[in-house]
Amino acid sequence: MIDFELTDEQRLVRETAREFADKEIIPVARENDRNARFDTDLVKKLGEMGYLGSIVSEEYGGRGIDYRTYALIVEEVGRGDSSARTVVSVQTSLVCSSIERWGTEEQKQRWLPRLCSGEALGCFGLTEPDTGSDAANLKTRATRDGDGWRISGQKQWISLGNYAEVALIFAQTDPEQGHRGLAAFLVPTASDGFSSTEVHGKLGLRASDTAELALDDIAVGADALMGEVGDGFKVAMSALDSGRYSVAAGCVGICQGCVDASVAYSKEREQFGRPLAAFQLVQEMIADMVVDTEASRALVWRAGFLKDTGQPNTMETSVAKLYSTEAAVRSANNAIQVHGGSGYVDDYPVERYLRDARVTTLYEGTSQIQKLIIGRAVTGINAMTP
Ligand code: COS
């Protein structure tokens, strides 16, 4: 049974995260966005708060919190700024949770404490210039070299890629094996042959670091392999089960931010001698945002409940990700409408909400991919390929 009542501890975590977002994230969000500045001071503060790797167990430097509590933190950070939220999601869900689940004891000891504290950042290298939705079809190659490996290829749209100390790189070891030939490697970015280039000109998430990675015949030891050869696709998919959840929780924050901003603005701004909030068509837009916010939050908490109780949750995570990312785009669009001309400039957060929300229906699996995962789960028929 899903319990929607928060525990005292969860209330405290939410309250603390809310204050952190209000005091540390929101005051710098506009300038960071304008200057496309990846705010390393803010990253440091996120680490100090324990918001990086918080679901990792305490013995490896995490906070050992459950997924529902994690969603409360991610929602508040997402309400503040999706660029900061992306740091939390990538570091925690894609990198740390993968190392904790698939890494050797040595790999966990080597990377997790420093990633959880924020002393080091990690990135997730799955997507390539020619490989997005079709994640099994990677061109990056890993070939055996004595005990170790040599890795060559390119990765695209990699969040934190210019700042990461370790890159979780997915590579093909045997093209004839398809997805069963993939392997995951923990590659130190200081390795010879590793380089990154900043991606500019993004619609949103301007304060988030995005990179293209080049891997030119990088030599790594056998200890870089995470999981077995052939486990790579499962490592990636299980990481995305957590990453999609985190994106969804961040989008609940965007939706809530849209409600908060629209309620405040519509009560303050007057037209025709009455506050905007007194007009039925304005209330309709606000009511739609409220419904989107609450439905998204309930879906995220359901997926979190399933994760916390060890039940299968891939489909439910896709449902939460699909709904809340689309809801965030809708809500931000409505919020701009409520704000009128003022919503079109960055005096208010709503235009940034729209620009930042837009990528969430693309990354970590497009809305179309989520629909195909849901459709396959309920029909038992795979419609992924023609
Ligand atoms: N956790 C662990 N293992 C999983 C899994 C999960 N959530 N989902 C699938 N697997 C395993 C399956 O059990 C299967 O194992 P076997 O080889 O032992 O049979 C294997 O992975 C292949 O699974 P499946 O048949 O579902 O793979 P598909 O090729 O059909 O997957 C989709 C296709 C579209 C679901 C996948 O490629 C995908 O998610 N694409 C989107 C990628 C994405 O999100 N990119 C964004 C990157 S981050 S910006």
Image: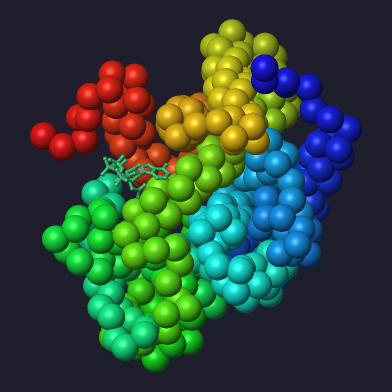
Nearest the camera: 38 or 28? 38
Residue 123: x and y in percent read 49, 66
Q: From what the image shows, is residue 366 above or below residue 311? A: below
The answer to whether residue 60 of the structure is visible from this angle is yes
Quadrant field for ligand 1: top left
* Residue 122 located left or right of residue 177: right
Please tell me in which quadrant of the rendered image residue 96 appears: bottom right
> Front-most of 81 and 86?
86
Residue farthest to the bottom, as pictured: 192
Give percent across and percent down for residue 8. Answer: 88, 33
| Quadrant of the frame with the C terminus | top left
**Relative to 159, residue 353 above or below:** above
Q: Residue at the spot x=27%, y=47% of the render? A: 133
Q: Position of residue 125 (x, y in %)?
A: 39, 65
List x then y, in percent, for residue 232: 36, 59
Locate residue 179 relative to residue 311 in the image: left or right.
left
Q: What number of labels is visible?
A: 0
Q: Residue at x 67, y 59 (%)?
A: 52
Q: Nearer the viewer, residue 383 or 229?
A: 229
